[in-house]
Image (cartoon, grey):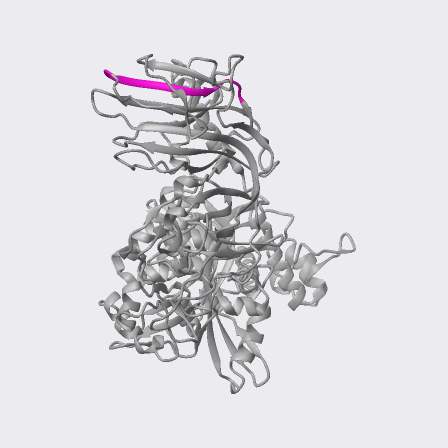
Amino acid sequence: MNKHIKLALIFAAAALAGTGCTVDDYNDAYLDGFDSDQEVTDIQTVSYTLTDADYSSVANNAANKAIAEAAGPEAVEALAAVGTAKCFSEAAPAETYLPAFVSAGYNSYLSNGSTVTVTYHKATAQAEEIVKLTAAETYTVTGENYKSVWGETPANYFTPSKPLEGYADKFLSAAYPDATEGTVKLVSYNYSDSEPSTGGESAATSIDESFAGGLNAWQIVKGESSSTWTLDSYNGVNSAKVSAFKTEGAQDLWLISEKVNLSASEQPQLAFDVKISYWTHDGLQVLVSTDYNGVTPEEATWTDLTHCFAFDGSTAGKWYTAGICDMSAYKSDAVYIAFRYTGNAAEEKTTTYQIGNIQLGDGVVTAAGKELFSDAFEAVDAENNKIFDKWDVKAVADETKQWYLTTYSNNTYAQETANKAAGAVESWLVTKEPIAVPAFDAEGMTVLGFDLKIGYWNADCLTVLASENYTGDVSAAEWTDLTAHFLIPQTPTGGYADNFSAAGLAPLYQFAGKSVYIAFRYQGNGAEKRTTTYQVDNVKVASISRNAASAASTLAAMTRAAMVKERYAAYTFNGTNWEPTPDTAVINPEDYEAMGSSHPNFSSSFSPDVYLPVYLKLKYPYAQPEETKDIAYQYYEDNVTSPRADRYAFDGSQWTKVEAYETLEGPFKKVDGKWSFNPSLTIVVAPDKSELSKSIYQAGVDWVIANKDPMYRYDNRSDSYMTDSEYYSGCAVGYTNLNWRINTLPKYYWGPAGEDISAYENWASDDKEAARASYAAFYAETEKRFGEVMSGALGTLYPNVKMIDGIDVIYTLEFMLYTQHIGSSTGKVTHAFEFKLVADGKFEYVRMYALAPEFELMRDENFK
């Protein structure tokens, strides 16, 4: 039954649910004679060629992963390599892992007895090491590893005096105590040509980072994470980019600046631009530390500055200034700035962040820009009394305690406190009119700022809020809390601060293109001693601009070695120790840059096939003929970067890639609901003019045309050449059976080719013995010819079928024969023909038999 019909029946039956009409009622009414208890079958022979994406599906199939995990770590790695190397291997055979893939694709509509022949790639014997290299897990040298190398010297890299080779065995042996001989790992590490300074170094005084020189001035710490921070260059904009998209496991990635001393700055600030793409989670923190040891960030004390910045996932891939953070509190200590990204693809936490134009120090803001709102609380009425002319004062609790104006040293400001209140105090200071915020990035960065002075702090009582729908009732409006963007001190606890200080700047990107009310809310309680006094002045909303970073990095003094580079190396366990994998090179980020790429990977537009031969010639100038090298590299495809590897051979003048796989065909058959590898294949050449049937017949015709007298394709009756029929063995594409009629085949088609057909002329004789002899001779000759033809045709149809030690591979073809029987008419009877694989892609005819034994061609009953 056609699978589309079957699905229609299923859908029709499903539609009956809840209607009161049963499936049997439907069958009786519309499918006369249909037996609902009879199993619907669809036995087919299908051919399928795996795509690159299919290999990934095989590697990620849950059933396959369970098989590999049961077999051990090496099997798990080998299965993972199927997805990256795009081929199977001895360690991950197609016979083991294709059944689950076939089941997922065909099990729902193909019945028992069906066969799916899959064309796939398998790594050649010499390429097995390539597959292992492709699947190799990456070990990242840790901060603790570096500390064991350098002791108290703050260095997170290897150097000429302390190379990786001297320490890799120790690190890898500790990380993989159960490794087996032949296991391959990639090692990710940092390297510098310069030795670290042991003291006396001075810190930089600012950061002015455009990333024009890459990420070299920044330290990347990624621990066990499979992703990393990378340099991105697009439309002239350089940035540090990070994402957890299509990664394995949790990602924890640090991008850390050099040490910066801000003591000489007057009013230092930190600012940077950000672009957020494919937002799924808030995954970026901005941190500052004064005690980072330059190696292990997990041992340092970090203060979170994220609240100073706006990371708006709705900005849809647009660059904007994330915020401007006041760093005056750090003028007395040298600091490190860190961007820390956390994500996990399995938890759909894969947001992409790009960071650029980073500045730390003075002169970050260049101009105040357009002022949208300003109030220094100097307004007076007709009697010269100070008044709130731009603010509403709202008391929610204790109307006697409200925001009020006061003057000290000729400066007027707004003040509120719960001092001497009997109980709870809640007072609001809200702008009377909404403030129109410009459209996104239309006039620079729109921010809210104010000056603040604290008196007698004993509790946090102040919040800064914004609303789009305030109409006079603070309790009815929806408010966004902006307090985290400001530095609101918790001192002094006695008396007042000496001076007003800038509280910070809150970016208003989320209100771009909208109108917003700003509010200061005081919440205290006199009875509970929550009575802190807050004085607010110089409230402003303005669009501001800032300098663009002009250098790769103007860090004045480097505390870690200049130009620290991220590198990779391959190591193999020899059963006792870890040693560099012989004849193997790994392409490093600096190599991609030298080749002219702005990304640390190859891609379809930056092909490894073009650049690797040149790379090898430069790297190994004294290579000898027949020398080979395995090359591991990163390749970007379908929005993900993954490892790949190739083998190259040197012929004395150039390096050429060695084909890493062979193309094979594997038949998989469904028996008792289970798919399994079955090298013997049965092909039903049904009388239905299907593409499969026509391809089988055409292969026979093509073989005869190529290998026999042209007369066997000449139609004497129409006087025209035929290319879809042959009369040597009876194949005809336009018909649905083999033409084995004795009254036509020898007489009309064998004769013109010079055949002696006298042995078949008695086929219609009344002498049954003579007739029987004619039939016997005819069918023997026809079977011989068909066996010859179809053996050759199978070789052209299945050239990639390989011999299997200890297994006879038999291909059985079922054909409908159009035959002549003694007595009167013709008969159409299905016969099976067996062919044995005798060499790769070469078949030999074995035998023929009728599927209905009573119609065996040479049975005596056919001649009665």
Above or below, comparing residue 380 to residue 733 in the picture? above
Q: Residue furthest left?
A: 528
Q: Position of residue 797 (x, y in %)?
A: 55, 60
Above or below, comparing residue 771 to residue 326 in the picture? below
Above or below, comparing residue 684 to residue 807 in the picture? above
Q: Position of residue 450 (x, y in %)?
A: 45, 33
Q: Position of residue 425 (x, y in %)?
A: 30, 18
- The part of the image, by quadrant, that contains residue 224 is bottom left
| Residue closest to the eye, 663 or 254 | 254
> Would you say 416 lies left or right of 233 here?
left
| Residue closest to the eye, 844 or 153 | 153
| Residue closest to the eye, 848 or 364 | 364
Q: Is residue 513 magenta?
A: no
Residue 499 visible in the snapshot: yes
Magenta-drawn segment: 422-434
Residue pictured at 38% horizontal, 54% vertical: 253
| Residue closest to the eye, 11 or 595 | 595
Residue 850 visible in the snapshot: no
Residue pictured at 25% horizontal, 21% vertical: 525
> Would you say 818 lies left or right of 523 here?
right
Q: Position of residue 543 (x, y in %)?
A: 57, 36
Q: Main secondary structure of the magenta part?
A: strand
Q: How many marks?
A: 0
Residue pictured at 59% horizontal, 56% vertical: 763
Q: Is residue 433 magenta?
A: yes
